[in-house]
Image (tube, rainbow, N blue to C red):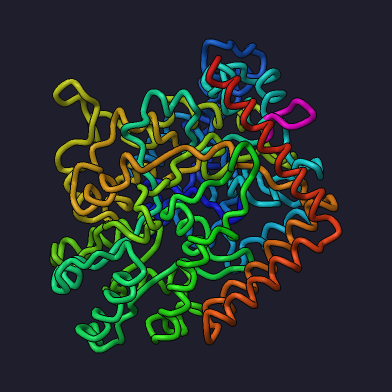
Amino acid sequence: MDKMRKSAMLLLALMMCWTLAACYGNTGTSSNDTPENHTKSNANLMQAGAASQTKPSPDEPAWKLDTTPITFDWYINFDWFTSKWGGNVVSDYITKKTGVSLNFIMPAGDASEKLNTMMAARTLPDFITLGWYEDAVLKMIKGDMVLPLNKLADQYDPYFIKVADPAKLSWYTQADGNVYGYPNASSSPTDYQKYGQFITSNQTFVVRKDMYEALGKPDMSTPEGFLGALKAAKEKFPKVDGKPLIPIGLHEFTETGNFSLDTYLQNFLAIPQQKNGKLYDRRSDPTYLKWLKVFRQANEDGLMPTDVYIDEKRLEKDEKISQGRYFAMLYQWSDFTEINQALYQKDPNKVYIAIDGPANDVHDAPTLAGNGVSGWTVTLISKNVKDKKRAIAFLSYLLSEEGNKDLYLGEKGITYDTIDGKDQFLPEVMHLLNTDRKAFDSKYGGSYMYWMLMDTNMNLAWMTGMDAEPTKQIADWTRGKTISMTEFDNLDPDPTTKEGIAEDRNVRLWAETLPKLLMSKSDAEFDQLFTEFMKSITKDPEYGALVASRQAAYERNVQKLKSALNQ
C-alpha cells in the first residue's frame, strides 16, 4: 500500500546528537551598546533596506540580496531526529554565508499527535518537513496552512524555478495549479536514465556475518532454508553477551502495518504491483501468503520473541543492533549505518552484511524500491512564516547544486578540496566519516547530516563514503536490483473524502490483522483470518469507489511520467 511504503533513503543514518551552539540572532543593540555595535547594526539595517528595493533576478540567487541574521523555526516530523544547528563546520558556514540560522523542532513522542496539535491550533512553524505519504500533507494544503512555492518564487525569488527540477514540480502540482512542497531524495525518470546503474535501495535482508559464516552460509531464499537458518542460529548462539539472541528482526508494527512484512517482503518476492495495467493487491498474492506463513511458523517455533511485536521502536532496535543481538533482519540498512560502522571498527567479522533473502519459487531477482519522484520527505513553508522572501530564497539555496554541495562537503579548504580533479573530503575528514560517524557529525556536520533538501543524484559527484566497508558491501548488493516505483506513489485519495476514509479503515484493519496472522496457531487459522480480512474490505460500501480512485491516480501517474521523459 502507498501509505506503508517509505522509500527510505540512502544516508539516513545521519541522526546523532551534539551540542547546540549559539544562534545568530538579534541585530539590534544590547548591553554591549558600543559604537562598533551601532555601526554593525546600522550596516545590517541598510543592507536589509537595500535588499527590499532590489528586484530579484531569475539568474541570480535571491538569498544573496539579504544576508542579515535571521532564525527560522523548522519542524521535522520524526521523533528520532535529534540534530541541532550550529557548532559544526557545515551549519556555521551556511549561516555565515546566508545569514540564516535554524531552530529545529521535533516531536517528543507521537509525531502525528504533535503535528495534528499544531495544525489544529494553526501554529505551524516557518518550515515543515514530513514524509510525502503522510495525510497531514494534504490536510495542510486543503486547510490553507501552507504557501504555494511557485507564487513565492514569482514574487520573491524566480531563481527557484531555475534550480528546481521541472519533473518534480510537475509531480507535486496540485489540482489548483500550485506546488506546496519540494521533495528530498527524489529521482525523476530522467535521473534513472542518467544514474540508474548507481542508484541503490534501502531495502535489505542482512545477517550477522560471523554467525552466518559459522552456520556454513545457508541459503535463506527458500522457506525451508530460511526457517532452518533461524533455528540453527538460535541453537548455536542462544546468548549474545548474556542476552537472548533474536533470530529475526523487523520494522516496528504500527497502526498502518509493518514495512518489513508488507512492501519489503513483497519486493523481495518480486510481486508485481499491477497486472495488465490494473493495480494488483499484492496482499492476496499466493507467494506472499506462502511467505507470511513462513513467518507464522517462525513465530510458532519461538524464533520471533514478543519484543519483535511490542518493543521494536527505532531507539530500542538501535540498541539491540549495537549489541549484535539480531541474527537476521529484513530492514532498511541506512537506519543502522552508523551502528554497523562502529561494529566494524571493533570487529569486522561481527558486522551485518546483505545476502539474498526470501525469494519466489523461480528465484526472480528482487524488485527493490529506489528513490522515486516523490522522494522520501517534502518540505513546506507555513503561512505563519516570519519572512516569505528569506524563506523561499533559503529553500532555493538548499535545493540548488550550490546548497547541496555546501550541505554535503562543507567549506572548501576546511572540510574538502579539489583532489585528483574531483571535489571531495580531505583525507582526515574522510577518515573520520568512515570510522566515527558521530564524531564526524559533531565536528563537521557534512555528508547530509541536514538531509531535508538533499539531492541524492547530485551527491554522486562528491560521494566517496560508499567506497568504504561495511557500507560498500550492502550498497553494492542492492545495485541492479533497484527500480523506480514512482507510478505507484500518491495513489491514496484525499483522506477527507469517503474513499479516503475507506482507505484508512482498510489500512488500519490490515495493521490489526497482520500480527494476528503471525500469531495464529495453524495455517488453517491463518487462512480463516485472511479470508475474513478480505471479506471485510471488499464488503465496505466505498470499496468500489476506492479501487476506482486508486486506479485513476495510477493512470494519471503513468501519463505524468511519460510527459516527464519527454521534457
Q: Say which quadrant the C terminus sits in.
A: top right
Q: Residue at x 64, y 77 (%)?
A: 528
Secondary structure predominantly adopted by residues drawn in magenta: loop
**Taking 52 as reference, is 484 left or right?**
left
Q: Is residue 47 visible?
A: no
Horizontal arrangement in the rendering, residue 527 relative to residue 188 (left or right): right
Where is residue 132? Give x, y as percent. 61, 45
The answer to whether 106 is drawn above or below residue 131 in the figure is below
Q: Please identify the residue farthest to the bottom as the structure is shown.
A: 242
- Res 394 quadrant in image: top right
Closest to the observer, 462 or 325: 325
Residue 397: x and y, percent?
Answer: 50, 27
Please tell me which residue lies in front, 91 or 52.
91
Residue name at image x 50 percent, y 69 percent: 252
Give how far across and how far down residue 177 sits, in percent: 75, 25
Name the residue rendered at 37%, 31% in the picture. Answer: 196
Q: Residue 216, can we see it?
A: yes
**Image spot of residue 52 (x, y percent):** 66, 19
Residue 383 falls left or right of residue 435: right
* Vertical placement of residue 378 versus 312, above or below: above
Q: Residue sitting at 62 percent across and 53 percent down?
A: 281
Please tell me whether residue 117 belongs to the stretch shown in magenta.
no
Residue 540, quarter of the rendered image: bottom right
In depth, the one of 48 and 332 nearer the eye is 332
Q: Which residues are magenta?
A: 173-180
Left or right, residue 557 beside residue 265: right
